[in-house]
Amino acid sequence: MEFFSPATLGIFGQLALATLLGALIGIERELARKTAGMRTFALVSLGSALFTIISQIAFVSFVGSSFDPSRIASQVVVGIGFIGAGMIVLDKSHVRGLTTAAGLWVSAAVGMAVAYKFYAIATFGALLTIFILVFLWFVEHKIIKRINVPRPGDDEED
């Protein structure tokens, strides 16, 4: 595969889109002052896209053999789960980091969708994720928590 061939330039575009969409999701986490922010989400989305593209290219090379490169994409999900688990902290019966871990997981899915050239699905998924992180946070923290009796640790945010 040549560096400036149309196929390679298309892959570069996919990687750039995955990075951009992951960064857009991460901006909300950055604004919420969370540990994993824009760069982390961009890297997760880029990495998952890159692994998925590699598995697609490898699949063509290994047709007819017992090697199954589609396993690479499935292992992205497992690896991101491992990273996400590291983001979750239990502190005095209060769990923190679940939303960030879930956001990383979705960011990986967005990157994989871009890698499979599901651009509209990836973009819509990223927009839905941003909607969840921004609008539903507002609903949860500004409306629902004012109605409900406060629980221990409710003053802290995910």
Image (cartoon, rainbow, N blue to C red):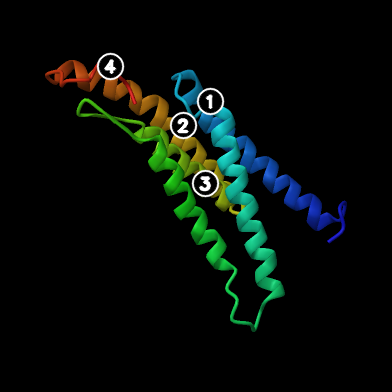
Q: Which residue is mark 1?
A: 27
Compared to residue 3, the image places residue 146 above or below, namely above
Viewer-nearest residue: 24 or 2 = 2
Mark 2 and mark 1 in contact (Cβ < 8 Å)? Answer: yes
**For the residue labelled by badge 4, is the local secondary structure a helix, a strand or a loop?**
helix
Viewer-nearest residue: 115 or 35 = 35
Q: Residues within 10 Å of mark 4 (few under 14, many from 20)?
A: few
Looking at the image, residue 123 sits to the left or right of residue 35; the answer is right
Q: Is residue 116 visible?
A: no
Cα distance between the residues tagged 3 and 1:
15 Å
Tell us which disc is closer to us: 1 or 4.
Answer: 1
Cα distance between the residues tagged 4 and 3:
29 Å
**Amino acid type of disc 1?**
Ile
Q: Which residue is mark 4?
A: 142
For residue 108, which numbered disc appears in the image? 3
Viewer-nearest residue: 88 or 122 = 88
**Residue 141 horizontal/vertical position (percent):** 28, 20
Viewer-nearest residue: 97 or 113 = 97
**Amino acid type of disc 3?**
Ala
Mark 2 and mark 3 in contact (Cβ < 8 Å)? Answer: no
Q: Which residue is mark 2?
A: 130
- Residue situated furthest bottom in the rendering: 64
